[in-house]
Amino acid sequence: MSDPVTALNGATFNAGIASVAEVPLQGMITLRGDLSAAAIQKAATVTIPGDMPTAGRARIEGENGVAWMSPDEALVLCPYADVSAVLEKMQKTLGNSRALAVDVSDARASFRISGPHAREVLAKLCPVDLSPAVFTSGMFRRTRMAQVPAAIWLSDTDCLQVISFRSQAQYVFDLLVVAAQPGSSVDLY
Amino acid sequence: MSTRLNSGGRLLDKARPVPFSFNGNTFSGFAGDTLASALLANDQLLVGRSFKYHRPRGVVASGVEEPNGLVNMGEGASFEPNQRITTTELFDGLKAESQNHWPSLEFDVGAINSKLARFLPAGFYYKMFMYPRAFWKHVYEPFIRQSAGLGKAPTETDGDSYEHFYHFCDLLIIGGGVAGLQAARTAAKSGARVTVLEQTAHWGGRAVVDGGAVDGQPVTEYVDGLVAELGAMENVTLRTRTMGAGVYDHGYVLGYENLRDHTPDAPGPRHRLWRIRAGHVITATGAIERPLSFAGNDVPGVLLASAIRDYAVNYGVSVGKRTVVVTNNDDGYRTALALLEAGQSVPAILDARDDVEGSSLARRASDSGITVIPGHAVAKVKGGKRVEGVSVCRQNGSGDVVQEIACEAIAMSGGWSPVVHLWSHCGGKLTWDAEQACFRPDPERAPTGDAGQSFVTVAGAANGNFELADILEDADAAARTAAKAIGHTIRKSKSPKAEREEVAPLAPVWLMPANAGIELRSKAWLDYQNDVKVSDIQLAAQEGFESVEHAKRYTTLGMATDQGKLSNINGLAILSDALDRPIPQTGTTTFRPPYTPISMGAIGGEARGDVFQPLRRTPMHDWHDDHGADWEPVGHWRRPYAFVRDGERVKDAVYREVSNTRENLGLLDASTLGKLIVKGPDAPKFLDMMYTNMMSTLKPGKCRYGLMCSENGFLIDDGVVARIDEDTFLCHTTTGGAERIHQHMEEWLQTEWWDWQVYVANVTEQYAQVAVVGPNARKVLEKLGGMDVSKEALGFMEWADGEIGGFKARVYRISFSGELSYEIAVDAGHGLAFWEALMDAGKEFGVMPYGTECLHIMRAEKGFIMIGDETDGTVIPQDLGLSWAISKKKEDFLGKRAQERRHMADPKRWKLVGLETLSGAVIPDGAYAIGSGKNANGQKNVIGRVTSTYYSPTLDMGIAMGLVLEGPDRMGEVIEFPGTEGATFKARIVDPVFYDREGEKQNV
């Protein structure tokens, strides 16, 4: 078996007002079910024990985490190599609950945007209030990035992470490069 | 002559000369100049020719309302026409050319139109160019195109980049004059997030030019203090060079930021479009001075009084050594006083009012030794390309000249019109203020938000307050109103107090002199840019264009790039007068965004070049590109149409791919096909509803081809369904159907069958899928090794999980080509490696990749339908001979009842057949078959149409599928398809399956 590759082989851009880097493959599992049910919550948090995040929020630590996607959908994060094991564990936890858990790790591309202007770069593309006072750590926002869907969160101070569809990885990377072009800082936040 | 003064010029950096060129001549200005002030400083009074009569025109204004000063700017990739010189900041190396003249600005042949003016009245185009009909195309249009038009169209692609920015605030204040800044300071105390936009590069608006004192402090210092204070506040955002362009529903506002027009060599985007959501909006957009309508008011050297003041104070520029002021209100006196202070002379102030006793400004002018002539007006301006003097008459007369005064410039003030545009964009209504003769916002009829609440408040001059003291009070009140509207409270504090002038009331003057005859009226301009005169509006009224909107379109008043900022109110006053009705009854035309033109680039934002549109790429995309892929758009995907080799034509590549796949081995990148996981105890029941055929009886490990219809019975998608386990299915959709069908399923699950135990997930992109097709398909897989893919272990229409060549794979034995075929899904991250492994292992078996056209031909040879070719939203499965895939046993499925409607069951519906041309030629796609006789419209009766048509390399002939009236009952009959250029194709109706009817090749 070959080594799995990301859509853009770890492309980076460092010549602008923020750094853009494609993130290595990340294990992602879509879990659909009634997020208020105990078994579903337990399955959703298998990689990061604790409470199920409320609407618009996530708990992410390193490669593990869980994000609220919709009233009946969660995204479970884990190391890429662990997906099968985590899926199995989730299935056991779910038992006969009405739920669907499925590996979507390869269907996604992820990017990290870092630097003092990282928020501005995304605010050029996403109709989201990204000011530091409003968009804070722990939020997980599904939104639109120019013409495609994306999810964003603050992974560290001055560092935002984006998940897009794999087929649109090049478009998303190119968008970020345009939005981070030299001389384009808004100097707002 | 117009010249630079030694004094004045508060915006200039006189230590930094800036060279620029205009019409090829090199001039010099200073940093801080606008192009207009720099041209005036160089005595370039003449800046353009008018649109219709090609009259010489000079600068009239000093801001966004300027109608005449439009130029072609820049060169090549940075060329842009119609750039307004009064708002263009001067930069080193600026190149501009005046517009609308031939052969030169100084001598323009088109000026003959001016002599013909009496033959070119309002509505001239409509009257003249109607007849004879044929003249339009060959005579009139070419002539009009030659002589009309403003700037040139750019010839190169725009070399700049642009961007959007999403911004959110509690309170947005549009306008950084003293009103906007005062409102911001008051509102910001509440802690609300406040953003202030100012369209120019400078804060303070008019107040800093007009002067006055606030709390005993000069207003310029007061403004500096406000800006410093606001700049230090965390919750306040200040942006200059950012125009509030439009106000839309629910507090959505567009801001237009100019980033690089004044520093074209700097890196970064040129313009930024701010897409703002504001809790509440304050428009502190100021007011625009109105011209006066007198004969010759368009001669270069006649300017708005406020503009002359601006040029003197801000840029240290005098338009003329001797300036006559003509006014109907107190404000014009400010210009006279400013000019005196700048060392210029003001021979007279002509005040249309008889009584100016009460005016403290008038008193100051008299005391300064200026001759004030009340009750008098301009009869006519003397001079052609520049002002030479003015003939004076009584305002209440018909223009008998009582005196002539030599002068170089005329400063006119017809009163002020509040800038109500942004208030009006989203439905704010206006009220007529008779005392000040202007429309101002009616606070009782504000633009309303989602709950019917007002979301716009007006402050300052935009609200009809023209005195500094009133402006500050109003701004303070507006801030309090706005803060309350968004749930913030402001502690009581003292409003700043400004000194008050004693004001004599304005006299509405719409025509000068009041009883001017036709001679004067037809030289009194309303709309400078579109050449509309007082006489044109009067003619329109006389001809019955009573509605202001009709009169506007008939005369083109206010339809130029300045959108009537100077002409609107004057024009509708003239119209009202002509119709003998009050002005408010005439009303205004509609104010629409943007406030001034914004660049197309800013609207497009980042969406150009590589990111014009999102392209979707499969994991093997780059490999395809490296191997000659001729791309075809399929939705947002790009799929290889064919893999073209050196020296090969595209169609040769396609035929080669077909033959090779039929004879050896072909690989197709099928990753784009939709893959939906449907899971849950009710999944079988759900899929029985989704598909026309029975899915619940499918056994795990098996595949079944299924059809999906809309509730109206029409075929919307097809694909192979694999049952993974008792509760789980994987549904393949068409490439374009993945998102659409996913949404279709979710809609039914969420709205109708919300209690069914089913979940759906779209896993299309999780997998790279490769179709391994051809007689050697099994051999290559066996060579790679791994799972058993023999006929016995993996029969036709079965699937299995396993490993192939070390890759974790799910293998479906399905065929869309009629050949032995495996579709193999691997995780997308391994897709490229798997594809390369197949190419490598397949060498000895003659492997070649193939594209979508080869796929199409092979499926057509087999008579397989294609969604989008055989279907177009009006076709039902029964039309396509697919009745076998429609369950008779199921109680219900989506489309079932619709298909029982009389029209759907009509035996006269066109049905699918194969078509074989007698000559072997290929029938054009979409060709119609004609029958005998004619229809009610005298057209030949149509009895069918081609849905798919190809040259079949396998059969060496043209094959087609089509929908034909009673087609299946007419096997063997020959029907005719007229082509283009008189050709007719004769084709025999045959079975749509042209190749391997028994299906032996796929089932080996």
Image (spheres, coloured by chain):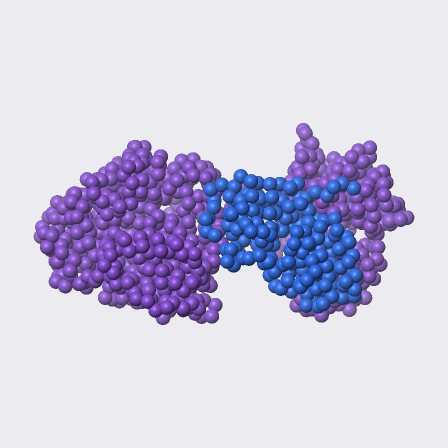
Chain colours: A blue, B purple
Q: Is residue B449 left or right of residue B997?
A: left
Residue appearing at x 74%, y 66% in the figure: A39
Q: Is residue B454 above or below residue B928?
A: below
Quarter of the figure that contains the C terminus of chain B: top right
Q: In this view, does A189 lie to the left or right of B103?
A: right
Q: Report the front residue among B27 and B829.
A: B829
- Quadrant in which residue B364 is drawn: bottom left
Find the residue positioned furthest to the top.
B647
Q: Residue B75: where, in percent of width, then height?
A: 40, 35
Residue appearing at x 79%, y 64% in the figure: A95
Quarter of the figure that contains the N terminus of chain B: top left
Q: Report the front residue among B195 and B876.
A: B195
Residue appearing at x 24%, y 39% in the figure: B41
- Quadrant in which residue B724 is drawn: bottom right
Residue appearing at x 63%, y 50% in the figure: A164
Q: Residue B542: where, in percent of width, then height?
A: 27, 60
Q: Report the front residue among B525 and B470.
A: B470
Q: Can I make out residue B938 in this image?
A: no
